[in-house]
Amino acid sequence: AFENQQKTLEMHAIRLRTDKRPVAIAALSVKDGHVICQFSSIDSGEIEYTSPGDLLFYHMIENACENGNDLFDFGVGDELFKRNWCDSQTELYDCVIALTAKGRAGAVALTGLTQGKKLIKANPRLFALARRARIMLHRKIT
């Protein structure tokens, strides 16, 4: 029966009572006691100071524990909220194998881009600046 099948993706949200607008959303997948956060998005508007993302993650982690899961994985990327919740980190590595001259040039560019992102994310001031720029760019486009 459908009810007995394992869910592929679970969606979670915190919504405002007043207008039912979601202020924090996240999607989880679960496999063999391993809960993985596939994505999350937190409203950066006037409600941000109330930490709806922290509340959402609290409930998701509580639910994962109640259901007997062994691990809650926030997924790829380094964010302050992930470090606030987690006491372990998995190092990830990129492997680029270039077979042609054009591929080697692309590999150098890709490696530079990856290292640039890593540098920005490791510096709180640069990361805050990059986030503000991304928000401003998004507002101009929409």
Image: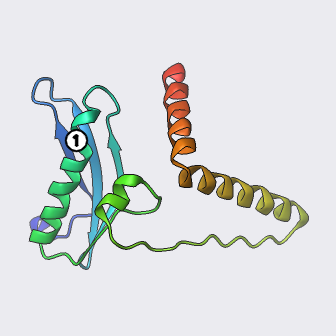
| Position of 54 relative to 38 (above/below) | above
Left or right: 106 in relation to 56: right
Q: Residue at x 51, y 47 (%)?
A: 124
Quarter holding the N terminus is: bottom left
Q: Residue at x 85, y 59 (%)?
A: 105
State the residue position of label 1. 52
Q: In x, y percent, where is residue 52?
A: 22, 41
Q: Nearer the viewer, residue 41 or 132?
A: 132
Q: In x, y percent, where is residue 61?
A: 19, 62
Q: Nearer the viewer, residue 120 or 111?
A: 120
Left or right: 123 in relation to 40: right
Q: Residue at x 75, y 73 (%)?
A: 97
Q: Within 10 angstroms of label 1, few (less than 14), some, or many (20 or more) residues?
A: many
Q: Nearer the viewer, residue 12 or 119?
A: 119
Q: Is residue 4 visible?
A: no
Helix, strand or loop under label 1: helix
